[in-house]
Amino acid sequence: MNFDILWLDRLDSYVKDRSMNQIFRLKNSLPLQVAIAIVGVWAISLWKCVQIRLDTLQPIWFIALFIWQTWIYTGLFIIAHDAMHGSIYPSPRVNRAIGQFCLWFYAGFDYPQLCAKHHQHHKYPASDRDPDFHNGQTKHFWGWFGHFVSEHITWRQVITIISMFAAGVAICHYFFPQPLWWQAVNLACFWVFPSLMSSLQLFYFGTFLPHREPVGGYIEPHRAETIPRSRWWSLISCYHFGYHRKHHESPQIPWWQLYE
Ligand SMILES: [Zn+2]
Ligand SMILES: [Zn+2]
């Protein structure tokens, strides 16, 4: 009898441990699932977009698709950014693989190089040692953006983008029976230009607004502001990246938990 009770107790605790373990694992893999979902939506969306006949598309639909592609490209960068902070999966290899994949398709970035620069930004925010900060003279939007781009763009990246674009045109031409120039225009409209627009979106909501000097001066040590806005606008504007002080305080929090 005693033996039976002991055995049942053990079985009960085994089942509890197992289910707790499964819940823990599931919770742990949630950022990975979110990352895969964003990358999946981006891939399907691009694949569908390159098949569109632009001459049959109404201007309003073209604008809507262009805005959507810009937003989903921003999502691709946000996933790479989470990977830089090791927030996607408790394995540096997985974070690095996902981060590099996203940055290649975002704009041919080299992950280790951008990762090092981003950590420098976190270490010396809004200072002359911060690669994302303005040069101390031109603090207005376009001047700062120009300096920001010059700090991050490399010749290697430009060559990577051109090569990827040429490969993309060839692949699309292989799968869809349309002229090469047609595929080139489609890829430019739904990959190159949305990705460029997305860099403006990321810069404006994730660098310019949160890191420009407030009227009362910077608040140390993060020198970053949070831009208060509603949950939906925060998501639409830049995947909650406007909650920037919180991001600097706790960089390991994934983007979808910044609002909470
Ligand atoms: Zn920042
Ligand atoms: Zn960061």
Image (cartoon, rainbow, N blue to C red):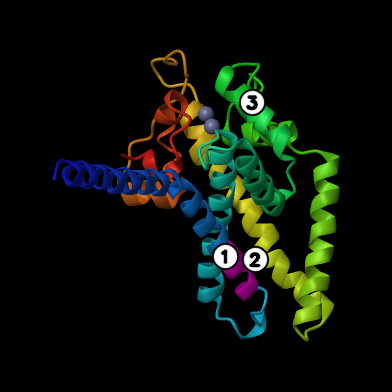
The magenta stretch spans which residues?
A: 42-49
Q: Main secondary structure of the magenta part?
A: helix
Spatial CA distance of label 3 from label 1 is 30 Å
- Residues at marks 1 and 2 touching, judged by CB atoms closer than 8 Å: yes
Label 2, secondary structure: give it.
Answer: helix
Q: Residue at x 72, y 31 (%)?
A: 151
Please give the residue where the numbered disc 2 appears in the rendered image.
190
> Which residue has dot 1 on it?
66
Residue 51 x %, y %: 66, 79
Q: Is residue 7 left or right of residue 222?
A: left
Where residue 113 appears, as percent x and y from the top left, is 73, 33
Residue 237, given in percent of the width and then of the height, sits at 44, 48
Mark 2: which amino acid? Answer: Phe
Q: Residues within 10 Å of mark 3 (few under 14, many from 20)?
A: few
Residue drawn at point x = 76 percent, y = 38 percent: 153
Residue 46 in the magenta stretch? The answer is yes
Residue 151 colored in magenta in the image: no
Element under disc 3: loop
What is the number of the mark on residue 138?
3
